[in-house]
Amino acid sequence: MNRMNAIKIPVQLFSMALLCAGMFVIVFAIGREENQQQTKQSPPGKGRQMLVEKQFNPFDGSHLELTRIIKKAMRNPASYRHIQTRYRDMQDYIVVKTVYSSEYGQGCRIKSFVKAKFDEYGNLLEVMDAGFCPADSGDGIDVNAAAVLPDERE
């Protein structure tokens, strides 16, 4: 009888440990699934802000995906130089406007812009506008102001 009790105790401990490990895995999986569902929904406040901020280069402020799209469309992607990027959070999407310069034949540099909509995860929704920035005519107009969305001007 003594030996039977000695065998039952390790089996009971093993069963309890297995049950606890199984419960841990279930709780972990449920918590992870809830976290993924919260991430997929439009996260309010800081969560959404963090998702939006991850879309931008921390060094020069350029939008990572928009830069990739612009370079892909260029004849000479190596000539791309970021000048300025601004964005406005519209809650359902963000509007990003980037001003950049590039070589345009015979080594001449031109200044251009692209304005596009992105979701909070950095997926392109729509290219809204693109074109050349006006040349500095010496009349005191700030060429870099082209990068500022109209409703951001103070």
Image (cartoon, rainbow, N blue to C red):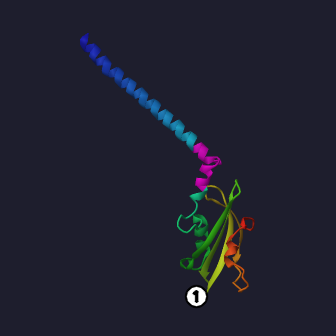
Give the farthest residue toward the top.
Answer: 1
Compared with 37, 57 (above or below) is below
Give the farthest residue toward the bottom.
Answer: 106
- As shown in the figure, which amino acid type bears the numbered disc 1? Gly
Q: Secondary structure at mark 1?
A: loop
Residue 43 forms part of the magenta stretch: yes
Q: Residue at x 31, y 22 (%)?
A: 10
Q: Residue at x 66, y 76 (%)?
A: 144
Q: Position of residue 101 (x, y in %)?
A: 61, 79
Between 8 and 120, the one nearer to me in the picture: 120
Quadrant in the picture for residue 125:
bottom right
Between 73 and 48, the one nearer to me in the picture: 48
Q: Residue at x 25, y 11 (%)?
A: 2
Q: Position of residue 57 (x, y in %)?
A: 55, 65
Q: Position of residue 20 (x, y in %)?
A: 42, 28
Compared with 132, 32 (above or below) is above
Between 52 and 20, the one nearer to me in the picture: 52
* Classed neighbour count for the residue bearing mark 1: other residues with Cα under 10 Å, few (<14), some (14–19), many (≥20): few
Q: Where is the N terminus found, in terms of image quarters? A: top left
Question: Which secondary structure is most common in the magenta stretch?
Answer: helix
Q: Position of residue 143 (x, y in %)?
A: 68, 78
Q: Where is the C terminus found, in terms of image quarters? A: bottom right
Q: Which residue is mark 1?
A: 107
Residue 74 forms part of the magenta stretch: no
Quadrant in the picture for residue 61:
bottom right
Compared with 130, 140 (above or below) is below
Is 137 left, or right, of 24 in this rendering?
right
Compared with 32, 52 (above or below) is below
Give the farthest residue toward the left.
Answer: 3
Magenta segment range?
36-51
Quadrant in the picture for residue 135:
bottom right
